[in-house]
Image (cartoon, helix red, strand yellow):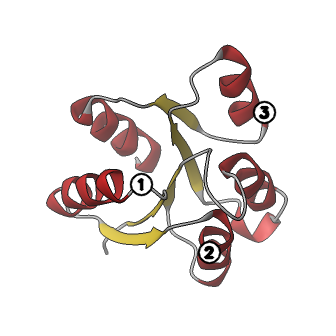
Amino acid sequence: MTDKVLIADDEPNIVVSLSFMLKREGYEVLVAPDGLQALDMIRSDPPRLVLLDAAMPGMNGFDVCEAVRADPGLSGVRILMLTAKGRETDIARGMGAGADAYVTKPFSTRELIVRIRELLA
């Protein structure tokens, strides 16, 4: 069975490159362009992993992360914050919201794939 990964990001270039990379690695890829849609998708058909941008329209990634962590039925969903917000306070906020990992943009695709494999192992 293929692991389902949701990319929640409003930057088309990031979505295209992440989708390509993840599909090449054998993952099933879903995409949400904003936080509200991401949360709806996570609740209706939970993926194994969410790559979650912090700055999105509708609902930011920190709030999406907190909402997922507040739902016991979604405890198996892994969350990797993938964002340009790289200050210590942002990282602390993401981890405090319940993220399993925090990667700042720009990122190394090789390192990102390693983190994804670790989270899904």
Residue 58 versus residue 7: which sits nearer the camera? 58
First in sequence, mark 1 or 2: give its number. 1
Q: CA distance from mark 1 to mark 2?
A: 15 Å
Q: Position of residue 14 (x, y in %)?
A: 34, 50
Q: Quadrant of residue 77?
A: bottom right
Quick check: 102 left or right of 88? left
Name the residue: 69% across, 35% down. Answer: 94
Rendered residue at 69%/70% (across/down) = 36
Q: Nearer the viewer, residue 84 or 116?
A: 84
Going 30% across and 53% down the picture, which residue do you hit? 13
Of residues 23 and 48, the one drawn nearer to the viewer in this rendering = 23
Residue lying at the far right of the rendered structure: 70
Residue that carries the numbered disc 1 in the rendered image: 11
The residue lying at 66 percent from left, 50 percent from top is 61
Q: Amino acid at mark 1?
A: Glu
Classed neighbour count for the residue bearing mark 1: other residues with Cα under 10 Å, few (<14), some (14–19), many (≥20): few
In the picture, residue 45 is in which quadrant? Answer: bottom right
Q: Residue furthest top?
A: 88
The residue that mark 3 highlights is: 96
For label 2, the SS is: helix
